[in-house]
Amino acid sequence: MPTKRQSNDFINFIIDAEKNPKLADEFLSKKTAKNLHSFLHKKGYKDIPYNHCQDILAARKSMRGRIIPGEGKKAVDCVGGQKDY
């Protein structure tokens, strides 16, 4: 259930996902904008438009492997691990 704020946008989702690792894991499992948009709406975050879901996925992809300031971890370590080829 989404937080009780005026709008249920992506910032609210991030705040809620920080408190609920299962919600964060579900979010990370979504690979297409269509699936992400559907997931967010089903969870009550109805103020996040489809084109924002496209941007969210593009940003998530471009951030893979970056260092998280202050944490000493790569972003990829927080998103399921780096792939070895």
Image (cartoon, rainbow, N blue to C red):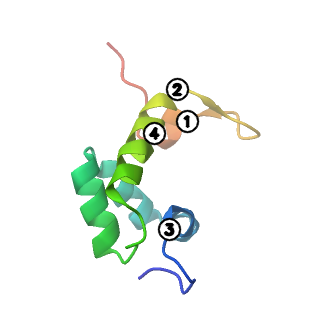
Q: CA distance from mark 3 to mark 1?
A: 23 Å
Instruction: Work out whether 17 lies above or below 75.
Output: below
Q: Residue at x 48, y 75 (%)?
A: 8
The structure residue drawn at horizontal position 53% and vertical position 71%, both measured from the top left corner, is 16
Q: Nearer the viewer, residue 44 or 50?
A: 50
Secondary element at image label 4: helix
Q: Residue at x 42, y 27 (%)?
A: 82
Mark 1 or mark 4, which is nearer to you? Answer: 4
Residue flagged by tag 1: what amino acid is it? Ala
71 with respect to 58 (left or right): right
Note whether 2 is above or below 54 in the view shown.
below
Kind of residue indicated by mark 3: Asp
Quadrant the N terminus occupies: bottom left
Disc 4 residue type? Answer: Arg
Q: Secondary structure at mark 2?
A: loop
Mark 1 or mark 4: name the one nearer the start of the chain.
4
Return the residue found at the far bottom.
4
Per the image, label 1 sits on a secondary structure element best described as: helix
The residue carrying mark 4 is 60
Q: What residue is pinned by disc 1?
A: 75
Which quarter of the rendering shows the C terminus? top left
Earlier along the polypeptide chain: callout 3 or callout 1?
Answer: 3
The residues tagged by marks 4 and 3 sit, at their Cα atoms, a distance apart of 17 Å
Disc number placed over residue 9 in the picture, else none: 3
Q: CA distance from mark 2 to mark 4?
A: 10 Å
Identify the residue under disc 2: 65
- Tell me whether the residue at label 3 lies in contact with that at label 1, contact meaning CB atoms closer than 8 angstroms: no
Q: Which residue is located at x 52 percent, y 77 percent?
A: 7
Q: How many marks?
A: 4
- Tell me: residue 83, above or below residue 59: above
